[in-house]
Image (cartoon, rainbow, N blue to C red):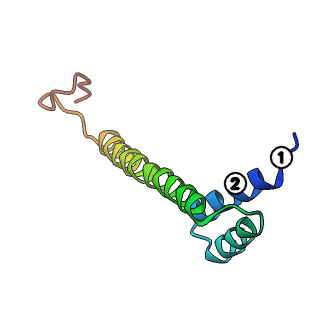
Amino acid sequence: MSLDQRTIVIAQISAAVACNALAALRLAVTEALTLDIGPDEIQEILALAKDIQQQPISHVSHLVDQLLRESKKTTHKHSTNCDCGKHHA
């Protein structure tokens, strides 16, 4: 697959935003400007990348919460009064 330079620089901006890589972002934005990608379009790319970057945070939090709940379940001591359905007194 061959990508044109414009697509590559847009991907570089997005990746730099996702990784919080400021040096890479500076380089990619500078290159975008030399390719005549205007400031408004660069702002639009940044906004989209930042929106996407925010989504995994909630997914990560949800996954960690789920894993922590599961670890509580695995440390559960079964008894005849635990009401879990697995009575191993």
The residue that disc 1 covers is 3
Give how far across and how far down residue 32 sits, in percent.
Answer: 72, 65
Amino acid carrying label 1: it is: Leu
Task: Mark 1: give few (<14), some (14-19) or many (20+) Cα within 10 Å.
Answer: few
> The residue tagged with tag 1: helix, strand or loop?
loop
The residue that disc 2 covers is 11
The residue positioned 69% from the left and 54% from the top of the image is 11
> The residue tagged with tag 2: helix, strand or loop?
helix
- Report the side of 23 relative to 48 (left or right): right
Tell me: residue 10, above or below residue 16: above
Rendered-image quadrant of the C terminus: top left
Task: Mark 2: give few (<14), some (14-19) or many (20+) Cα within 10 Å.
Answer: some
Residue 28: image quadrant is bottom right
The residue positioned 46% from the left and 53% from the top of the image is 51
Inter-mark Cα distance, 1 to 2: 10 Å
Tell me: residue 88, above or below residue 72: above
Tag 1 near tag 2, CB within 8 Å: yes
The residue positioned 54% from the left and 60% from the top of the image is 46
Q: Which is more toward the observer, 12 or 4? A: 4
